[in-house]
């Protein structure tokens, strides 16, 4: 029997950046943490109002950060950063500073309290307006408060597992 990935892929890969307040390890104090999560399950939902949805696995560290802050940024990544995107997908931000490890550069978003990724081809700054439980994932719907296309480039698409491809033309 075919798998969903055999039918619904390739899918564009994004990095979702998020920020939240978390408890410091071995301390009662809290700190603000930024994270980047690799996703290929995402889609536009509405033009008016402008809505975008991302699907996160239940129990994901980033889901907790998004719930804490109520915001996130969708970063559309170039194929040249495949290694960095894979690292962000394979490692939990709970124990790893993905920005430090990958050398991805953080910039402050313009309309929300969250970081965006400087190397992204484009980004969407979103404020959470809804959550929908769907089996083993949570769909988080965000209202787009700001969007910008930084530059042209070939975007990264996941074929299956660690197999990636890209577009013929730059978007």
Image: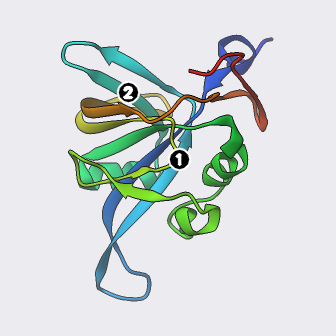
**Secondary structure beneath disc 2?**
strand
Query: Would you name the residue on which mark 2 appears?
Result: 53
| Residue in the foreground of this view, choosing between 149 and 67 | 149
Q: Quadrant of residue 158?
A: top right
How dense is the environment of label 2, judged by Cα within 10 Å: few (below 14), some, or many (20 and up)? many
Q: Quadrant of the C terminus?
A: top right
Please tell me which of labels 2 and 1 falls first in the chain.
Answer: 2
Answer left or right for 6 relative to 57: right
Residue in the picture at 24% in, 37% down: 128
Determine whether 55 is above or below 23 in the image. above
Is residue 161 at least partly visible in the picture?
Answer: yes
User: Looking at the rendered structure, which numbered label has been put on residue 119?
Assistant: 1
Q: Position of residue 22 (x, y in %)?
A: 34, 69
| Spatial CA span between label 2 and label 1 | 22 Å
Q: Position of residue 18 (x, y in %)?
A: 38, 52
Residue in the picture at 57% in, 38% down: 77
Residue in the picture at 65% in, 14% down: 8
User: Looking at the rendered structure, which numbered label has been put on residue 67?
Assistant: none
Q: Position of residue 2 (x, y in %)?
A: 78, 12
């Amino acid at each position: 029997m075919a798998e969903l990935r055999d039918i619904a892929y390739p899918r564009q890969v994004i990095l979702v950046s998020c920020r939240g307040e978390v408890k410091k390890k071995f301390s009662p104090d809290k700190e603000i943490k930024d994270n980047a999560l690799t996703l290929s399950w995402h889609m536009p939902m509405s033009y008016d109002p402008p809505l975008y949805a991302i699907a996160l696995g239940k129990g994901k560290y980033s889901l907790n950060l998004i719930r804490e802050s109520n915001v996130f940024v969708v970063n559309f990544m170039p194929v040249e950063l495949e290694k960095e995107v894979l690292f962000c997908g394979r490692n939990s931000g709970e124990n790893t500073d993905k920005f430090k490890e990958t050398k991805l550069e953080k910039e402050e978003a313009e309309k929300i309290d969250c970081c965006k990724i400087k190397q992204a081809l484009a980004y969407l700054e979103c404020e959470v307006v809804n959550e929908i439980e769907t089996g083993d994932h949570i769909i988080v719907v965000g209202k787009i408060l700001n969007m910008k296309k930084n530059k042209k480039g070939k975007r990264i698409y996941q074929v299956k597992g660690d197999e990636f491809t890209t577009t013929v033309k730059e978007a």
